[in-house]
Image (cartoon, rainbow, N blue to C red):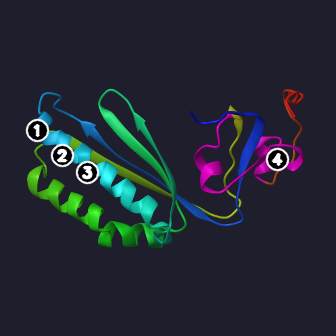
Amino acid sequence: MTKVIPGRYTAQTEDSFVVFLIGMRINRLWAVHRWLPVFMAMPGMIRELYMNRDLGFKEGHMYFSFRRVCIVQYWDSFEQLEDYARKGQKHLKAWRDFNRKIGTDGTVGIFHETYIIPKGNYESVYNNMPVFGLAKATNHVPATGRKETASRRLGRDNEPAVPTPVDTVR
C-alpha cells in the first residue's frame, strides 16, 4: 500500500513540462473482441516508458470509469512526447493496429490532449496523500509560506481564506 504523508504538500519544479492525457472509450460494450486489444496495448506502452526514462516520460497515473480508461502523463517536453508517439515501438504498433483494425467503425474511441505548461504556470496541493501526480513527477515539498495558497504557488500574493491546519504529526 502507498504510504500516506500527513500534511499539506505541493509540487515544485523550475522547468516547463507537458501534461498529456491519453485514453480510450468503449462505445460498443459487447464488442469485446474489438476494444480489448486496444486496452491490452496500453500496459506495454507504459512499461516501455517506465523502462526508458531518457525518452522524456516523467510519470503516469491510470484512471478507470465505466466505459473509459485515461492515463495522465507528465513529460519533459512536447518534442520528446511527439518523438515517442512517432518512433516508440509499442505506441507505433498500437497506432497502426488501431487504424487497420478499428479505423472509423465506431466500436472504440481513443483520445489524447496535450498541455504545454510554461515554467511557473502551474500549482497543486496534496493534503494527506501519498506522493502523487505532478509531485511524483517532479518534487514533493511542503505547501507552506510562499507555497501555502494557490495564488502564492502561482507567484501572486494573498492570504489563506481558511487557516492551514496545525501539523500535529511532525
Q: Is residue 18 above or below residue 107?
A: below
Q: Which mark is residue 147?
A: 4
Magenta range? 129-154
The answer to which image quadrant residue 100 occupies is bottom left
* First in sequence: mark 3 vs mark 1: 1
- Contact between marks 3 and 4 (CB within 8 A): the answer is no
Q: CA distance from mark 3 to mark 4?
A: 39 Å
| First of labels 3, 4 by sequence position | 3
Which amino acid is tagged 2? Pro
Contact, mark 2 vs mark 4 (Cβ under 8 Å) = no
Amino acid type, residue under disc 1 in the picture? His
Pointer 3: what residue? Answer: 41
Image quadrant of residue 169?
A: top right
Give SS at disc 2. Answer: helix
**Does residue 11 lie above or below 128 as drawn?**
below
Among the two numbered marks 2 and 4 on one chain, the one whose residue lies closer to the N terminus: 2
Q: CA distance from mark 2 to mark 4?
A: 44 Å
Q: Residue at 22% of width from left, 58% of height from top?
A: 94
Q: Which mark is residue 33?
A: 1
